[in-house]
Image: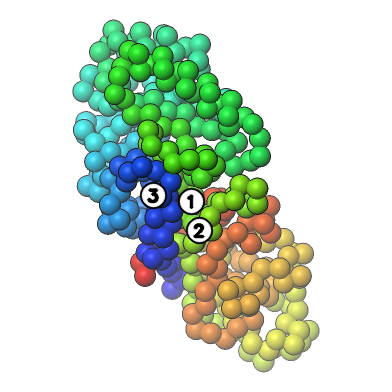
Amino acid sequence: MSFITLSKENYFYNLEQIYSRVGSLDQIAVVLKDNSYGHGLIEIARLAREFGISRAVVRSTDEAEKISRFFKYILILSPNKVVENRNFYYGVNRLEDLERYSRNINIELKVDTGMHRLGISPNELHRAIHLIKVRKLRLSGIFTHFREADEISSTLFVQRKIFRELVDEVVSHFPNINIHSNNSAGLFRSGEKIRDEMVRIGIASYGYLPDIPSFKFPKLRPVLSLWGEKIGELKYPKPYFRVGYGGVSEVGEDRKVSIYDIGYSDGFRRLPDSAIREKRFRTPEGNYLVGRVSMDSIALNSDREKIEIFNSVTPLAKILGTIEYEILVGLSEKIERRII
Ligand SMILES: *Cc1c(COP(=O)(O)O)cnc(C)c1O
C-alpha cells in the first residue's frame, strides 16, 4: 500500500527556525487546520507537543476536539459548534457570531484590516466592543490576517498599521488579551524578532516558504514524502507501446515500466499531457511518469518495489500552476502516515 512518511527531524528543524524568530516558545501556535495541511492531524499534533509547542490553530470544533489533549490553547477559526472546554478559543468572524457564545466561553475577535474575506470591519468595532460588554462575554484575543505577506507589496505594512490602531482601541477596554497577526511569511518578513505577539504558523512548519529572492527567507525542509508500492508491471514492453488512458506517451527505450498504487483519488493530481510527454515531473531518483495519472495508479519507468514519488511538492505546484498548500492539503486521509 502507498504511504506517507513524516520526517520528525525536518519538522523539528523548521520549528527551530521559527523559534529563532520569536522571543519564547509560548508565542508559537502551529496551524493544524485541514488535517495539518494534509500531513495528518494527530501525527503533527503529537510531534508539535513533543517539541514543546502548547498552542494550535484549527478550522473546526471537530478538529479541536481530536487534539484537545495535546494543547493548552486551541484557536478555532470557523467553529462548527460550541462546546465548553477551557482550552478552546472561538474565532469571531462577524458581529452576528457574538450571539452564539455565553459568558464562560473564550472568544477572539477577528478584525478585517484589508484581506476583505472574514472579520469584523473597523467601522463595526465599537458595536462589537459594546456587545461584548453588555453580554459580558469573555474576550481573550484579537487578531487579523494579512493579504499579501508572501508577495512584494506594501499592503502588509498598511494592514499592520491599521491593526495596531484597532488593537489599541480594544486593549483600552480589555487589557491583557492575546494579540496576533502574522502567518509564516509575515513572521519571516518582519525585520526583527517578534516579541510581543503570538504567531500562527502553518506552511513554514511543514517546510515551505515563498521563493522570492529579495525576501532572503531561510531554507526550510519539507516534512512529507509520498511513497507508492508496485502493483504491476508492463510485460514485454515494446518501444512503441503507449501507456494508460489516451496513450499520451510511449514506452520508448525504457523497458522497465511498473504500475504503482497512487492515483488522483489519493490526491496525486492529474498533470497536463504536455508535462507527461516532456517528462517534466521527476521523482527524487529521477524517474518519470509514463502515461496519464489514473484514479488509483500511475506508471513510472522503474522496477523498484517501493518508490518515493516526491519529497517536496514545489516542482508539482509549478507544473500545475498552483501553490504547495493545495497539493499538500489534497493528499487523502486514507493514506497511512508514518513518522520517521
Ligand atoms: C491558514 C492560516 C494561517 C497560516 O498561514 P501560513 O501561510 O500557512 O503560515 C494563519 N492564520 C490564519 C487565519 C489562517 O487561516
**Does 187 appear above or below 282?**
above
Q: Is residue 270 above or below residue 75?
A: below
Could you say which disc has been placed on residue 19 in the image?
Answer: 3
Query: CB of mark 2 within 8 Å of CB of mark 1?
Result: yes
Q: Of 22 and 330, which appears nearest the observer?
A: 22
Q: Earlier in the sequence, mark 2 or mark 1?
A: 1
Name the colouring of the figure.
rainbow
Residue at 60 percent of width and 73 percent of height: 283
The quadrant the C terminus occupies is bottom left
Q: Amino acid at mark 1?
A: Ala
SS under mark 2: loop
Q: Earlier in the sequence, mark 2 or mark 3?
A: 3
Q: Which residue is mark 2?
A: 220
On whether ligand 1 comes within 8 Å of the CB at mark 1, the answer is yes
Measured Cα–Cα span from mark 2 to mark 1: 7 Å
| Between 311 and 22, the one nearer to me in the picture | 22
In this rendering, would 197 be left or right of 317? Answer: left
Q: Secondary structure at mark 1?
A: loop
In the picture, the disc for residue 204 is 1
Percent position (x, y) of residue 60? 37, 38
Give the residue drawn at x 47%, y 28%.
144
User: Residue at point 52% right, 77% down?
Assistant: 307
Instruction: Name the spot of residue 59 as percent of width and height, x first.
Output: 40, 39
The residues tagged by marks 3 and 1 sit, at their Cα atoms, a distance apart of: 11 Å
Q: Tell which tag, 3 or 1, sits nearer the viewer.
A: 3
Residue 177 can be seen, yes or no: yes
Amino acid type at mark 3: Tyr
Identify the element where label 3 is drawn.
helix
Above or below, 162 against 66 in this view is: above
Q: Earlier in the sequence, mark 3 or mark 1?
A: 3
